[in-house]
């Protein structure tokens, strides 16, 4: 068996160019010095930093970023109240703070939540009369945003390399997704060194998120050869390195390849888009804002595989081969995916997380009425009827 990964040095920082210039590799956090220098020369002398409460500091990322900003005479204000499943209320609060401060760019430090919230703020800084809920209810179509630098602390969402962002409108139980070219981060930093502190639970959930991204992107009605080959690679790397990272959180090589898998997952769904699993997960974490997105995806995945197998058997056989032994029919493939999830210690079902049969009707309704989710369901490889969606939720209980 060829092991091409051994030919690369995880301590060498490489540039990976998508629409975003990504600095990738152990030690890449130091590249914030170059980015700050570029921004200072451009006259960007004030930035808003978007983060959660703790991780941006506990990982050591903030020490490096703050020093780079000070050395380049860039003033900053820090909004550190981004939660998992960020809300439009928080986006509005951060935008108000950033506007009053005069921020000319956004730096995000964290996983998908600070990145998505930061992208949203970047748009609203260009549209002084708009709000977060207007943005996520598609009441205007943005074509510009201030520059975004995404410093990634998890190996999951891929948001640092694509044009997507997600936020929850709490009062409506809506969790829509937006996609605009103006919010591709200009620069991103993927440094596995700052990811070794992820808890075992987070490690599992974020990597399962990456696997879901590529399964959907490879099987949508707009999938391309690029999204299919990326999907196979991502699943192979997660299958190989997730158990190693769970066993030894400090394993830098495991973090490096999980980080690469997530980054490629972000590029993959930027190309092939998403369908059932994400469209059905968003109502789950909209109804329960503390519910982990990656866990929701894991729970839904086997039932989604079973649903789409008839339309995409060959693709599923190819991309899932690294983690599923028997892909000869829909049931065996779905069971194989569930066995893999159990092998990485995610055996959960929706009922374990407090959902019941009584919630299925409301969840199904949200999947069809939440702005943007109908677009995802519209590119599913099988016809996404209310009956099909309800069946996926019920099988996941």
Image (cartoon, rainbow, N blue to C red):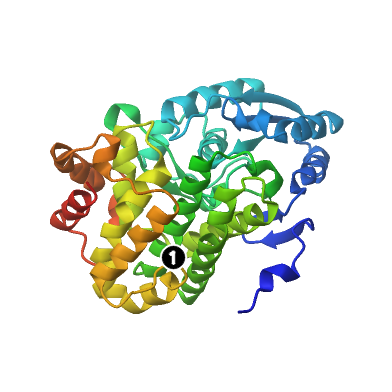
Say left or right for 79 vs 67: left
Q: 206 left or right of 152?
A: left
Percent of width and height locating residue 375: 31, 55
Residue 266 vs 189, above or below: the answer is: below
Q: Residue at x 58, y 44 (%)?
A: 154
Residue that appears at 68% across and 28% down: 57
Q: Nearer the viewer, residue 28 or 15?
A: 28
The x and y percentages for residue 35 are 77, 44
- Residue in the foreground of this view, choosing between 202 and 175: 202
Position in image of residue 370 (x %, y %) = 28, 42
Q: Secondary structure at mark 1?
A: helix
Q: Farthest residue toward the right?
A: 71
The location of residue 75, given as percent across then percent down, is 75, 26
Q: Quadrant of residue 292?
A: top left
Q: Residues within 10 Å of mark 1 (few under 14, many from 20)?
A: many
Task: Report whether 41 appears left or right of 177.
Answer: right
Residue 137 in sight: yes
Instruction: Tell me what residue is drawn at x 45 percent, y 51 percent.
Output: 209
Task: Residue under label 1, please give it.
Answer: 272
Quadrant into which the N terminus falls: bottom right
Which of the two residues, 364 or 174, is positioned nearer the viewer here? 364
Q: Is residue 166 above or below residue 383?
A: above
Asked if residue 380 can be seen in this view, the reply is no
């Amino acid at each position: 068996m060829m092991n091409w990964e051994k030919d690369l040095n995880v301590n060498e920082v490489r540039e990976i160019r998508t629409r975003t210039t990504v600095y990738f590799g152990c030690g890449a956090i130091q590249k914030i010095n170059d980015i700050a220098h570029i921004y200072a020369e451009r006259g960007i002398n004030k930035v808003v930093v978007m983060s959660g409460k703790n991780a941006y500091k506990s990982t050591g990322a903030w020490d490096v970023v703050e020093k780079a900003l000070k050395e380049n005479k860039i003033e900053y204000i820090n909004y550190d109240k981004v939660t998992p499943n960020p809300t439009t209320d928080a986006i509005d609060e951060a935008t108000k703070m950033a506007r009053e401060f005069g921020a000319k760019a956004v730096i995000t430090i964290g996983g998908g939540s600070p990145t998505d919230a930061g992208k949203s703020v970047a748009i609203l800084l260009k549209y002084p009369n708009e709000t977060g809920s207007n943005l996520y209810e598609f009441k205007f179509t943005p074509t510009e945003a201030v520059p975004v630098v995404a410093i990634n602390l998890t190996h999951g969402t891929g948001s640092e390399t694509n044009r997507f962002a997600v936020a929850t409108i709490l009062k409506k139980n809506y969790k829509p997704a937006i996609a605009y070219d103006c919010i591709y981060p200009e620069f991103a930093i993927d440094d596995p060194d700052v990811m070794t502190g992820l808890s075992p639970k987070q490690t599992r959930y974020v990597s399962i998120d990456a696997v879901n991204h590529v399964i959907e992107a490879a099987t949508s009605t707009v999938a391309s050869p690029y999204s299919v080959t990326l999907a196979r690679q991502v699943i192979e790397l997660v299958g190989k390195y997730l158990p190693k990272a769970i066993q030894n959180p400090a394993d830098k090589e495991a973090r490096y390849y999980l980080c690469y898998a997530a980054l490629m997952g972000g590029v993959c769904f930027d190309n092939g888009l998403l369908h059932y699993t994400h469209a059905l997960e968003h109502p789950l974490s909209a109804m329960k804002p503390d519910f982990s997105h990656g866990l929701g995806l894991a729970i839904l995945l086997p039932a989604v595989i079973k649903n789409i197998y008839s339309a995409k058997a060959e693709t599923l056989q190819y991309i899932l081969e690294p983690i599923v032994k028997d892909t000869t029919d829909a049931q065996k493939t779905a069971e194989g995916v569930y066995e893999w999830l159990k092998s990485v210690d995610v055996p959960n079902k929706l009922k374990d997380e407090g959902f019941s049969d009584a919630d299925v009707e409301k969840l199904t309704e949200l999947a069809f009425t939440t702005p943007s989710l109908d677009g995802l369901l519209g590119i599913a490889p099988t016809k996404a009827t209310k009956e099909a969606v309800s069946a996926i939720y019920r099988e996941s209980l």
